[in-house]
Amino acid sequence: AKRLEGKTIVVTGASSGIGKSTAKEFARTSPKNLKLILTARRIDALKALAEEIKAEVGDGVKVLPYQLDVSKPEQINNFVPSLPEEFKEIDILVNNAGLVKGVAQAPDIKAEDMSIMFDTNVTGLINMTQAILPIFKKRSEGGRGDIINIGSIAGREPYAGGGIYCATKAAVRSFTESLRKELVASRIRIIEIDPGQVETEFSVVRFYGDKAKADAVYKGVEPLTGDDIAEIIVFAAGRRENVVIADTLVFPSHQASAGVMHRKS
Ligand code: NDP
Ligand code: 8X3
């Protein structure tokens, strides 16, 4: 907890699921002196989360709810310049915002879904990284700070019906590895965490709001929770500066690959 004290942390996609859990886990782990910039499109959910955090840990954690659509480059361009002075010295960026739309297979993939997934999961993540990296690079020894990218098992093992989503997560993986190599002479840590199955709003979004279809995904299995991944994100951020948890794959015990899942009937 000491190592996180005084840090300013940005979490994208903090209105739900893994991002929301991550915000709370950072607050719990370092309740005395922390600044959290919580971003997503749903500002009301972020404001409610800020209240929840305050009720749980008090005023030691300063929370800034910030409406930001990472698929809109102009909004990202405006992000750092518009931050209040006391939130500008960002130390940790958690690139978590992301989504899947549909299970269509080629040639039936909708152009709109394809754009939404690439613009959010890939271009959004890269634009956020580019917006914040100059802050890190100004620091001593070539720069300091953490970038924690949320990839997926889907980026390592593509599956039928996930052509675009899997491609976006493979792109995240590739960009993350390039970045780690580009920054090897600095103290900037590039961290990737790849979850397997986690029960969040992910499947509800995949099925365009159809809750019954989303629930069927988790029938007879015991998925991870957002909190499980949040603990790992905060653990990685809290290591000694010379320790980089570069690359982590996380499954629930009954999952062994994207498609190999033990299901109770
Ligand atoms: P949720 O749907 O619960 O959360 C996704 C978050 O991303 C929301 O807070 C949403 O906020 C935000 N988001 C979506 N689009 C945008 C956008 N254009 N701009 C800003 N924020 C956006 O799903 P998860 O918590 O599961 O997903 C988090 C990450 O984890 C994603 O990158 C996902 O790919 C990854 N992942 C998920 C797995 C799973 O099984 N659930 C497994 C592996 C990886 P809002 O709608 O308010 O903008
Ligand atoms: C989410 C995991 O396998 O459902 O990233 O696509 S999967």
Image (cartoon, rainbow, N blue to C red):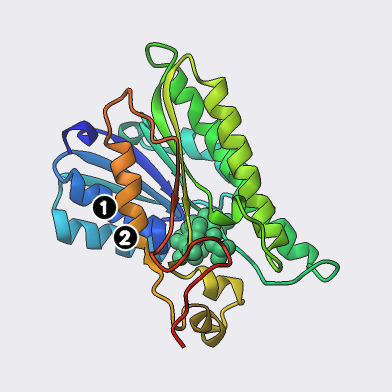
Residue 71 in sight in this render: no
Q: Which residue corresponds to the image point at 79% horizontal and 67% vertical from the top-left?
A: 109
Residue located at (52% from left, 84% from top): 216
Q: Position of residue 210 (x, y in %)?
A: 57, 83
Compare marks 1 and 2 and give the one earlier in the sequence: 1
Q: Residue at x 30, y 25 (%)?
A: 241
Check if mark 1's residue and mark 2's residue have beta carbons within 8 Å: yes
Q: In this view, does 26 lie to the left or right of 205?
A: left
Residue picked out by circle 2: 227
Q: Is residue 102 left or right of residue 4?
A: right
Q: Which residue shows up at 26% across the image and 52% down it?
A: 25
Compare residues 96 and 251 and report the one nearer the observer. Answer: 251
Location of residue 52 (image quadrant): bottom left
Which residue was labeled with disc 1?
25
- Secondary structure of the residue carrying tag 2 is helix
Question: Which three-letter amino acid code belongs to the residue tagged 2?
Answer: Asp
Q: In which quarter of the image is the N terminus?
A: top left
Q: What residue type is labelled 1?
A: Glu
**x and y percent of residue 162 in the render?**
68, 64
Residue 95, numbered label = none
Q: Is residue 232 left or right of residue 66?
A: left
